[in-house]
Image (cartoon, rainbow, N blue to C red):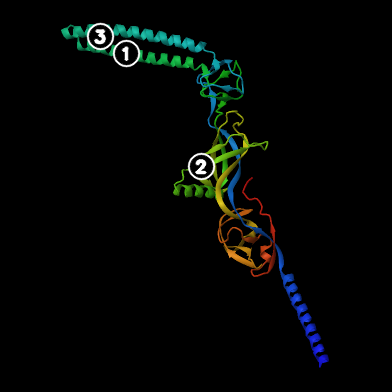
Amino acid sequence: MNLRLSALALLLMATTGLFGCFGDEGKDQKQAQAVPVKVLEIKEQSYPVMGEYVAQIEAMKTVDIRARVQGHLKERLFEEGQIVDEGQLLFVIDPRPYEETLKKAEAELASSRASLSKAVKDYDRFKALFDQGAVSREEYDSKITDRRVLEANVNNAKAQLEQAKLDLGFTQITAPMKGIIGRTKVNPGTLITAESTVLATISATDPVYVNFSIPEKEYLVAIRAIEAARKQGVPEKHTTLQIILADGGFYEHNGTFNMADRAVDPSTGTLGIRAEFPNPEKILRDGQYAKVVAILKNFENALVVPSRAVLDVQGRKSLLTVAANGTVVEKPVTIEYQNDRDSVIGNGIQSGELIIADGVNRIRPGTLVTPQTQDTPQTGTAQ
């Protein structure tokens, strides 16, 4: 009897050990089926939507200096490439022909005034005689006509004198505004043609315009942000802009939005924008190229994921997340903003969730995975 009991005990121990082996093997098989995946833990962050655009500097005002009278250039009174002040004398055209014309105009006016003075006296005398009946109506009317003709001659002589003074004044050509003056196109002794010959060009230097074009999509991001702020009663602010110069360095002064063009260019899908930048050191020059960096919108407390993590099936957006039990769960989401690198999630996920960013097309919901957390990359549309 004792022998039989001992044999039964040994059999039970062997059976228990056998089942224990099978149980561990099943657990190991289940763990072996879990797929290792790299995941990102989503955290709230500030996400600025920034754009970088090729731009060109434009002077706010550029004036071609032309002579208003014809003549030989006598003097040039400035250094090329320097700043000139408004009213500064730049060129002198030989004034002698215009001085002679002025003298003739003065003499003509004096003569006309003398003739008019005699005609007035004749008119006064004949009027008295006509009132007495001593002269005929025809003789009296003749004196009236003579006086009126000579009055017209005096007015014409005055006008010619004023024109002669203007022409003489135009022989001295002054700067119409403050700015930098370029190379002169003529030298002393050159015959200048009125209203035709360009003597030099002046460009205003401070401030300057910066022109660039923004894609329609990014324009919509900016204008909707402005409209949303307006509806919330937030005062409208002009976006602060920066310039990257040709040497790769940032220009030390920020600029402000000035205006947007009236229409989108249908051939490029872009909208022309003009900004205004201070230029106290005269570093920026008309025609110079640069890059404009602009903050179009800033998402506060944003949930940002790599765009490659977003599944798009017939317009339905979703993300693959990893639940606490290690299974993959697909969650529909809405996108507030998206570019080639990042997507800002409107709703559908929460901060702290784990999402799968790589190989999403090869993983199915319900799959058991082993999450391997990797660092969340720094996001932003420009650095």
Spatial distance from mark 1 to mark 2, Cα to Cα?
57 Å
Check the image and name the residue furthest to the right.
3
Percent x, y of residue 248: 67, 38
Name the image quarter holding residue 353. Answer: bottom right
Q: Which mark is residue 123?
A: 3
Mark 2 highlights which residue? 260
Q: Is residue 18 above or below residue 370?
A: below
Name the image quarter holding residue 34. Answer: bottom right
Taking the image as shown, residue 113 lies to the left or right of residue 258, namely left
Taking the spot 58% from the left edge, 59% from the top edge, the residue there is: 350
Crowd around label 1: few <14 · some 14–19 · many ≥20 (10 Å): some
Q: Is residue 274 above or below residue 129?
A: below
Q: Amino acid at mark 3?
A: Tyr
Taking the spot 83% from the left edge, 91% from the top edge, the residue there is: 3
Taking the image as shown, residue 109 lies to the left or right of residue 271, namely left
Q: Nearer the viewer, mark 1 or mark 2?
A: 2
Q: Secondary structure at mark 1?
A: helix
Q: Secondary structure at mark 3?
A: helix
Taking the spot 70% from the left edge, 63% from the top edge, the residue there is: 37
Mark 1 highlights which residue? 151
Of the 4 image quadrants, the one containing the N terminus is: bottom right
Q: Nearer the viewer, residue 266 or 93?
A: 266
